[in-house]
């Protein structure tokens, strides 16, 4: 099972967590972000972008509402 850590920065502040893909998808869905696509679409887009520099990011900046979600895969030594 793949594990990830993520950080969401928005007007409401910064929140971080870690878990599997299901936990990440729930986190995005529960965040109630403005202008957001379906949560599973955002997660799929992040994974499709790959982790060329060790992380992937989704940045939303439309209609005055801005947020960014940074995700990185956890290696075996990072998992708890």
Image: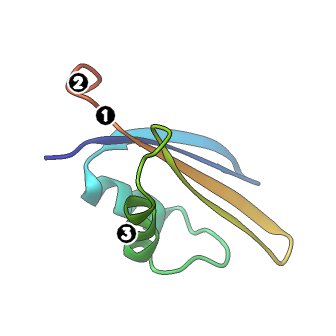
**Residue count near mark 2 (Cα–Cα under 10 Å), binned few <14, some 14–19, many ≥20:** few
Specify which label sits upstream in the sequence, 1 or 2: 1
Q: Is residue 38 above or below residue 44?
A: below
Taking the image as shown, residue 6 lies to the left or right of residue 9, namely: left
Numbered mark located on residue 45 in the image: none
Distance between the alpha carbons at the discs numbered 1 and 2: 10 Å
Residue name at image x 25 percent, y 49 percent: 20
Taking the image as shown, residue 61 lies to the left or right of residue 37, namely: right
* Element type where label 1 sits in the image: loop
* Element type where label 2 sits in the image: loop
Residue carrying label 1 = 74
Distance between the alpha carbons at the discs numbered 2 and 3: 24 Å
Mark 1, mark 2: which one is toward the viewer?
Answer: 1
The one nearer the camera, 37 or 44, is 44
Taking the image as shown, residue 47 lies to the left or right of residue 52, namely: left
The one nearer the camera, 39 or 72, is 72
Q: Is residue 77 above or below residue 36?
A: above
Residue 3: % across, % down:
26, 42
Residue 79: % across, % down:
24, 27
Specify which label sits upstream in the sequence, 2 or 3: 3
Residue carrying label 2 = 80
Residue carrying label 3 = 44
**Residue count near mark 1 (Cα–Cα under 10 Å), binned few <14, some 14–19, many ≥20:** some
Specify which label sits upstream in the sequence, 3 or 1: 3
């Amino acid at each position: 099972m793949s594990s990830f850590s993520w950080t969401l920065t928005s007007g409401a502040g910064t929140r971080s967590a870690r878990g599997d893909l299901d936990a990440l998808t729930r986190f995005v869905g529960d965040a109630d972000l403005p202008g957001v696509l379906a949560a599973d679409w955002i997660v799929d887009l992040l994974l499709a972008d790959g982790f060329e520099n060790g992380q992937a990011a989704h940045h939303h900046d439309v209609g005055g509402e801005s947020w960014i979600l940074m995700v990185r895969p956890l290696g075996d030594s990072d998992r708890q």
